[in-house]
Amino acid sequence: MSKLTLDGFFSYCKQIAEHIQLGERMAALSGQGTPRLTSAVGNLYYDSILPYREDANPQTREFLQRVLDVLLDYVQQVNDRNEKILDFKMPEEMLKILDLHLPEDPLPLKQLLEDCKTTLKHQVKTGHPHFFNQLSTGLDIVSLAGEWLTAAANTNMFTYEIAPVFILMENVVLEKMRNMIGWKGGDSILAPGGSVSNLYAFLAARHHKFPYYKEKGLTSLPGHLVMFTSDQCHYSVKSCASVCGLGTDYCICVPSDERGRMIPQELERLVRYHKDKGHIPFFVNATAGTTVLGAFDPLPEIADICEKYDMWMHVDAAWGGGLLFSKKYRHPRMTAIERADSVTWNPHKLMGTLLQCSTVHFKYEGILLSCNAMSAEYLFMTDKIYDPKYDTGDKVIQCGRHNDIFKLWLQWRAKGTSGFENHMDRLMELTEYMVRRIKEQPDKFQLILEPEMVNVSFWYLPQQLRHVPHSADKELLLGKVCAKLKGRMMQAGTIMVGYQPDERRPNFFRNIISSAAVTERDVDFLLAEMDRLGHDIIVD
Ligand SMILES: *Cc1c(COP(=O)(O)O)cnc(C)c1O
């Protein structure tokens, strides 16, 4: 037997230590309990991993791998129909459970891993198959992978210099989207949300009609500008009037018909009325897929009126844009969208791209630069070695811009254009299924209108209101049922559906099917669960 040297002894100790760590690691990976860091890494602080310690690659990897395990566990829970969507707590109670305080001294990595777990534990699972609450739902796995890569690349989208691949991706994807609208050429940008996209459209329209506004401001305008939009439009359109100096009184609400579509004759009447008063009608917003009812304004008629009175036509297709993929559903809903001057289209809604991903498109090449360029010399030098047209930073009213393209590009690669088309057709098919199921249970559910999109507007009738003839008084009671039933849904945590009133009626439910996780079985569950939670509600 050989003698144990000192070196041999140390190596022996190291092996034992590695075995202990291996044991801890095995325990962490065995699926028993939640992801854990080995004590060797868990007790480290931020300054013992990259980039503070060049030799800390293994520790850094272990930390990130355990965080990834937490995220993967969450992805699994989101897709588990036996899991609740949320564990609702009042804000005061939530504040007591969570340790949100910012410490004076550093916390160890194991605490940060716990913080990640706790955060997701109390988060609403918006990708759950029983979440019908919002226009942006679902957890597209490929898009998620894209978002993770985006975070790791951590670059800013203002210059080609620091985002060469992503800038070229933007060009390819945005051009494809413009082609789908029906344009050759043109200009586009990704903006932080549909509301800001609409603002970009407004700014471009004003610049197009009054090119001196940029330098001369209000003095360059020959009179008071007015804009038009339907009474069903997204509130961000009205906010343009406030932000851009028109005043909300000069954002004219055009009445809509009983299905929520702008009435073109009313638009023309109001345009004439304001012209006669000496105002300058210059901008019309048509909505393709309204936020509450999912209605489509009649684009051909609106385009005629815009042409006749020389007004800019913007289509807010933040919500409905995804249907451009569908040969079956695109027409007649968005027929004539190519006649618009600008279009807002949010991939983070129907297309299921992760938040945030919103685009705005223009028929005119170069309009964004012409409208928004400030030519900051520290970023957009004109003597760079590459063509400065690849620098997008001067096209926007922001400076830096988040990378919202990679997750969309990757998702598009995964699905192909045909995959998005199938997704749209499937969402519409499920909506038709839901409408059918509602009509099959007229004692419990009342459909408010035939939907044009995936918004299903309806009332739920508890036992108290069944077999009571419909009347305005009954509608008021049905409205109260919505708030009560929503409260019960939140407490039970099993389903989530939104409700709201509109100009024509008190509260009603608006169900949204825009998640790829939803199936017929989930629609059936939703209706049965509403009845289980709500049948004994009493209102007065
Ligand atoms: C959601 C929506 C918007 C706003 O989009 P955000 O990304 O939430 O800012 C604008 N218009 C319509 C029709 C919408 O549905």
Image (spheres, rainbow, N blue to C red):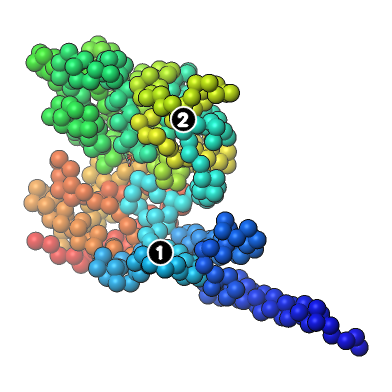
Task: Note whether residue 428 is visible.
Answer: no
Residue 477 picture quarter? bottom left
Dots 2, 1 in contact, CB < 8 A: no
Rendered view: 506 above or below 250: below
Above or below, 217 relative to 350: above
Residue 394 is drawn in which quadrant? top left
Q: Inspect the image, locate mark 1, and give the three-letter code of the amino acid beneath it.
A: Thr
- In the picture of the structure, the residue carrying the numbered disc 1 is 119
Query: In the structure shown, which secondary structural element does the residue marked by tag 2 occupy?
Result: loop
- Is 476 in front, or is 154? 154
Q: Is residue 265 above or below residue 349?
A: above
The C terminus lies in quadrant: bottom left
Q: Residue at x 55, y 24 (%)?
A: 384
Judge from the rendering whether residue 389 lies leftward or rightward of residue 256; answer left or right.
right
- Asked where in the image residue 21 lies, by quadrant, the reply is bottom right
* Ligand 1 placement by image quarter: top left
Q: Is residue 83 above or below residue 202?
A: below
The residue nearer to you, when weighing 202 against 447, is: 202
Q: Position of residue 50 (x, y in %)?
A: 58, 58
Q: Position of residue 101 (x, y in %)?
A: 34, 66
Give how far across and how far down residue 472 sits, in percent: 9, 48
The secondary element bearing badge 1 is classed as: helix
Label 2: how many residues lie within 10 Å, few (<14), some (14-19) or many (20+)? some
For marks 2 and 1, the one nearer the N-term is 1
Q: Is 238 left, or right, of 148 in this rendering?
A: left
Residue 203 rendering spot, x and y as whole percentages: 30, 25
Which numbered disc, 2 or 1, marks the residue closer to the eye?
Answer: 2
The span from disc 2 to disc 1 (Cα, nearest Å) is 38 Å
Residue that badge 2 annotates: 379
Identified at 37% across, 24% down, the residue is: 374
Q: Mark 2 is on which residue type?
A: Leu
